[in-house]
Image (tube, grey):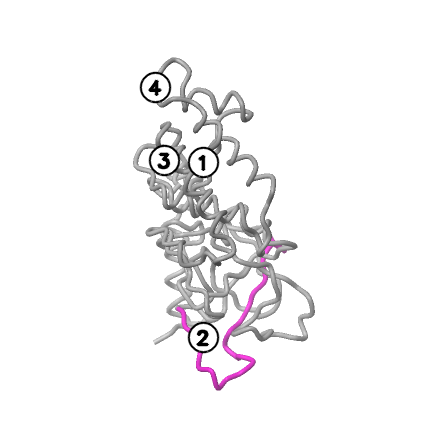
Amino acid sequence: MKHSARSPQLAAAVALALTACGGSGSGGADAAGDAAKAALGGACRTSADCLAGVCLESEYGTPFCTRPCDSAWEACPAGEDAAEGEALCVSYDVLPNPSVGPFIGDLTQFCLPYCVSVLDCRANNPGWDACDVPRYLGDPVKPSLGGVKVCASPAYQGKEPVDPALCDWDKTVAGRFANEANLCRSYCAYLDRCKELPAGSDTDCCAWGCYNRVVIEDEVQDGWHDAIKCYIETSAAYPDTGPINACTEPPKECGGVPEDPTPPSARPGGN
């Protein structure tokens, strides 16, 4: 049985979760733990990953941090996970086409980050696919809202979301971007070989984060594409061993220490 966003049982559970997150003057280790938790819209694996204590798994897409809200289609109130005016309270209680069946998820009314472009959304969660008006199966849920945009990950439009614990991102790659996907695999293999990734890192998770930087809204991002290509090609031009080798030279020729694109939610320890 699904809970509505206004369920008293859910509200009590969320209140307990907020307390568990140390939102009332906790310090020391608790404060450090809160600093590692994700804000509203951040990627998560469990509710313990989120400042507000709610990791939503639903048809909206890849699990993300949110919280229930009472006033549908109004700005969400301030919370420890987001300031006032940073999120919209969306509702999937009433769907544009009821014949398709109910929205599936533990919450049907929840907060979503406002955005101007998908880059705003991906700043803390590569799982977001779009910055768009709230939709369900392609149809606007609240047409009278106008052009107000929120972060979106439209798994319900036929795209299966990526699990940040598995980093099964290959299924999201369109055929025309196969070269960019392979470029990311090569870049993360270089990072792994040259010990530029933290111990315990998964190169698939690294490649997922890389691909989401290379291809944004079906456009190849030349800056990131050219940067990682420099590290790959420079590494290939030098021998594996010796004082000057495939790991020592790329940082010198490509502008410094290479960046690890692994999403925070998929890093060892989840941060």
Q: Residues within 10 Å of mark 4 (few under 14, many from 20)?
A: few
Q: Earlier in the sequence, mark 3 or mark 1?
A: 3
Q: Nearer the viewer, residue 77 or 143?
A: 143
Looking at the image, residue 265 sits to the left or right of residue 134; the answer is left
Q: Earlier in the sequence, mark 4 or mark 3?
A: 3
Q: Which three-letter amino acid code belongs to the residue tagged 1?
A: Asp
Q: Earlier in the sequence, mark 1 or mark 4?
A: 4
Local secondary structure at mark 1:
loop
Q: In the rendered image, which residue does mark 3 sit on?
A: 29
Q: Which three-letter amino acid code belongs to the residue tagged 3?
A: Ala
Residue 50, given in percent of the width and then of the height, sits at 42, 51
Looking at the image, residue 76 sits to the left or right of residue 259; the answer is right
Local secondary structure at mark 3:
helix
Image height check: is 226 above or below 2? Answer: above
Q: Which three-letter amino acid code belongs to the residue tagged 4?
A: Thr
Q: In the rendered image, which residue does mark 2 sit on?
A: 103
Q: Earlier in the sequence, mark 1 or mark 2?
A: 2
**In the orientation shown, which residue stands out farthest toward the top?**
243
Residue 270, given in percent of the width and then of the height, sits at 36, 43
Q: Earlier in the sequence, mark 3 or mark 2?
A: 3
Q: In the rendered image, which residue does mark 4 sit on?
A: 241
First to last magenta residue range: 84-105
Q: For marks 1 and 2, give the one nearer the viewer.
A: 1
Q: For marks 3 and 2, give the one nearer the viewer.
A: 2
Q: Residues within 10 Å of mark 3 (few under 14, many from 20)?
A: few
